[in-house]
Image: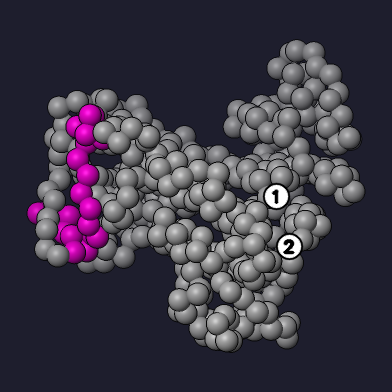
Amino acid sequence: MRHVIIGTGPAGVTAAETLKKLDPKSVVTMIGDEPEPPYSRMAIPYLLIDQIVESGTYLRKNSEHYKELGISRVEGLVDSVNQQKSEVNLNGGATVGYDRLLIASGSTPVTPPIDGVEHPLVSSCWTLEDARRISEVAKPNTDVVLMGAGFIGCIILEALAKSGANLTVIEMEDRMVPRMMNDTAGNLIKDWCESRGVSVNTSTRVESITEAGRGLSVSLSNGKNIPADLVVSATGVTPNIGFLDGTDIKTDQGILVNRQMQTSDPHIFAAGDVAQGKDFSSEEFSVQAIQPTAVEHGQLAAKNMFGLKNAVHQGSVNMNVLDTLGLISSSFGLWMGVENGESCELLNKERFRYINLQFCEDVLIGATSLGLTEHVGVLRGLIQTKTKLGVWKDRLIEDPTKIMEAYLGSTHAIGHNANIMK
């Protein structure tokens, strides 16, 4: 069996390894468009602050890992997929034939429609090449502007702030991490960043970027003009599915898949950032561009490519955990709540502590926390198991700090109050 995988990120690598484990005699080929060994984009911020070297970003540390497993790697940019011939066409004319194809091609940063955004001193922070370019400029006392304070933007924010640069963050929405945090939590993160020397402008757009001497001038919608030696763009990503033009593979936000990670073509599967897979909480199909989901998708897709009949996707739990200059924030499941649901929250603004719980009947369906790490696993576990809390739901509404007691009590054990807000 010839298994071909487009993409060498966590989903692709996990799938390749799983396929070789299930069927050692199969031919497994990964196609990637970067010269480096497969690496984790989430490790790039650590590279920017010299906590790791480039090899520290690699998904597998042994340089012979893929060769030893019998996994072939091809460097090339995919132009198209020929379903009739079961071939992947590469830029330059090469083709790779397949019996089963996995599309795990990841995402590409969105380029915002801003005058001057193509300037060489404007960069994404998505590839190792981007990281090298940023490292050359982002030094102590340089002026850096970061466009975007979403999940990816805040990961980059940490590295840029720790570089010693004078950092200004521009976010169009009215709070930081708007797709992960509610107003209270998002604005607490803003306060935290500003208390550590980062200037944060929310409800603000970049209007234009122009040359100014050796650097740039960034014009904002609030009337300010900010000098910059470097502008880093983190305004979102979009799935890499352009090479599917001309195929009959069904797409929406990403590639539509069933619970076996199979596309509308039974010989083609999708995983990771490109796959519009099942969401555990909503039971709808959506794109979840986070590494744990990519790994889960990759394993499941490989099992179905091999032919296991019981490998059915139960849905990925929406899970985000973020460290912003030492402040840990997290959100799980339907953190924004549901119609006719109940909720509770507790805030200690001075200590940057916050917890918000969302319920549907007596089941915890979503949670947001800030400055709390002790019960992250418990929150996720209660949501994922859909545990019926019974009387503990009302007790949590009265005091959401009793989450551990509720977990133990609802599973017929005895707990204690950890008083996590202090």
Classify mark 2: helix, strand or loop: loop
Q: Residue at x 53, y 67 (%)?
A: 137
**Residue 85 as seen in the image, left or right of residue 11:** left
Task: Determine whether 165 is above or below 291 in the image.
Answer: below
Task: Determine whether 260 is above or below 41 in the image.
Answer: above
Viewer can see residue 163: yes
Q: Quadrant of residue 300?
A: top left
Q: Position of residue 232 (x, y in %)?
A: 55, 67
Earlier in the chain: of badge 1 and badge 2, it is 2
| The residue stretch that appears in magenta | 66-91
Q: Which mark is on residue 198?
A: 2
Residue lying furthest top? 413
Q: Amino acid at mark 1?
A: Leu
Q: Position of residue 179 (x, y in %)?
A: 63, 56
Residue under pointer 1? 325
Can you say which quadrant of the picture contains the C terminus? top right
Viewer can see residue 259: no
Can you say which quadrant of the picture contains the N terminus? top left
**Residue 119 as seen in the image, left or right of residue 269:** right
Residue 89 is covered by the magenta coloring: yes
